[in-house]
């Protein structure tokens, strides 16, 4: 069976230097592959990166956003813009703060021979920023920390994922205004898809967020998640979820601890030292989740 044709979508919002490193990592593994960069940067800013095999989608409307909520959710809209333009049978997603490893494309293609799956690989930390770098990494990608389990995976991040285009087209109403991982994945799973960990398809992240930016970003993400999970009508379930959000930071911190102990126990001491920073970041997510459940606006 021949490998399916791939379109790689890069959501680009971090910096030109991040995008440069991301594209460089893809150069040796993207032969005969469509590469689409959906970016907030202008054609002038990316002039040095332009080449025939890379297609840029410029999103000028995303450059100067007044709303913090819109600023912190632009990556989801950038993904959507790229997917809508893609021509491959398989859609592989990555973000510009990530660098792909040498067999990333091929292993994603191999995985997507299974047409009824959500494929995803590990996310590793660049770890050049000390304790804050680790805290930020764990607040975003603890569940994607290698090695991924072969069975029982309950979450994959779209920062390093791949899908059949036909499957995504089947739930286009869910992502047409923004590709939110958990909402798209829930829809695909409802239609019979399963998570498929691709342990060899690793990326290395170097998240560019300052502490303040990270707090805002996590609050916004938590609020969206609370909106989605809370439901639009008041019920016992929604009330219980509202009170449960007070436990979210502690529960998430304990979950990170268990993951580190299981997957990379050599990092346990680093986790302990970075725990105060990590806890504050998780509190921001928890506050956002509380707000989303309490003031559900049914955002879509």
Image (cartoon, rainbow, N blue to C red):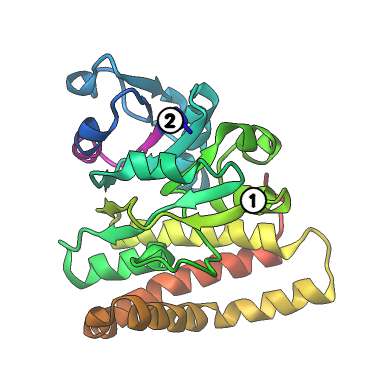
In the foreground, 213 or 148: 148
User: Where on the picture, by quarter, is residue 6?
Assistant: top left
Q: Say which element carries label 2.
A: strand
Tally of numbered tags: 2
- Decide: is 69 above or below 261: above
Q: Residue at x 76, y 76 (%)?
A: 239
- Decide: is 289 above or below 255: above
User: Where on the picture, by quarter, is residue 147?
Assistant: bottom left
Residue 11 among those drawn in magenta: yes
Look at the image and tell me whether residue 95 can be seen: no
Q: Position of residue 130 (x, y in %)?
A: 17, 69
Horizontal side of 208 relative to 297 (left or right) equals left
- Give the residue number, with chain letter if any, for mark 2: 6
**Mark number for residue 193?**
1
Residue 147 among those drawn in magenta: no
What whole-number distance in Å separates the C-alpha atoms at marks 2 and 1?
19 Å
**Mark number for residue 45?**
none
Q: Say which element carries label 1.
A: loop
The part of the chain drawn in magenta is 9-22
Q: Position of residue 298 (x, y in %)?
A: 73, 51
- Decide: is 254 above or below 5: below
In the foreground, 198 or 294: 198
Q: Position of residue 155 (x, y in %)?
A: 53, 62
Q: Which residue is drawn at 25% across and 39% down?
A: 22
């Amino acid at each position: 069976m021949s490998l399916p044709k791939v379109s790689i979508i890069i959501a680009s919002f971090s910096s030109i230097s991040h995008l440069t490193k991301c594209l460089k990592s893809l150069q040796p593994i993207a032969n005969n592959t469509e590469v689409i960069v959906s970016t907030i940067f202008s054609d002038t800013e990316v002039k040095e990166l332009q080449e025939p095999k890379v297609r840029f989608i410029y999103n000028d409307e995303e450059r100067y956003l007044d709303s913090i909520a819109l600023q912190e959710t632009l990556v989801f809209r950038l993904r959507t813009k790229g997917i809508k333009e893609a021509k491959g049978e398989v859609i592989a997603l990555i973000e510009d703060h990530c660098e792909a490893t040498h067999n990333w494309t091929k292993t994603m293609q191999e995985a997507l021979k299974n047409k009824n799956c959500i494929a995803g690989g590990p996310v590793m930390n660049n770890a050049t920023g000390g304790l804050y770098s680790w805290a930020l990494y764990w607040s975003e990608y603890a569940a994607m920390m290698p090695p991924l389990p072969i069975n029982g995976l309950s979450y994959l991040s779209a920062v390093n994922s791949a899908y059949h285009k036909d499957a995504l087209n089947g739930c286009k109403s869910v992502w047409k205004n923004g590709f939110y991982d958990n909402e798209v994945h829930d829809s695909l799973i409802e239609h019979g898809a399963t998570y498929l960990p691709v342990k060899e398809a690793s990326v290395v992240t170097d998240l560019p967020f300052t502490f303040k930016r990270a707090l805002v970003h996590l609050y916004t993400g938590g609020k969206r998640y609370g909106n989605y999970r809370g439901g639009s009508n008041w019920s016992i379930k929604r009330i219980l979820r509202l009170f449960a959000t007070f436990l979210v930071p502690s529960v998430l911190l304990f979950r990170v601890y268990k993951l580190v102990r299981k997957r990379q126990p050599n990092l346990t001491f680093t986790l302990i030292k970075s725990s105060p920073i990590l806890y504050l970041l998780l509190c921001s997510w928890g506050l956002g989740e509380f707000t989303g459940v309490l003031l559900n606006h049914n955002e879509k």
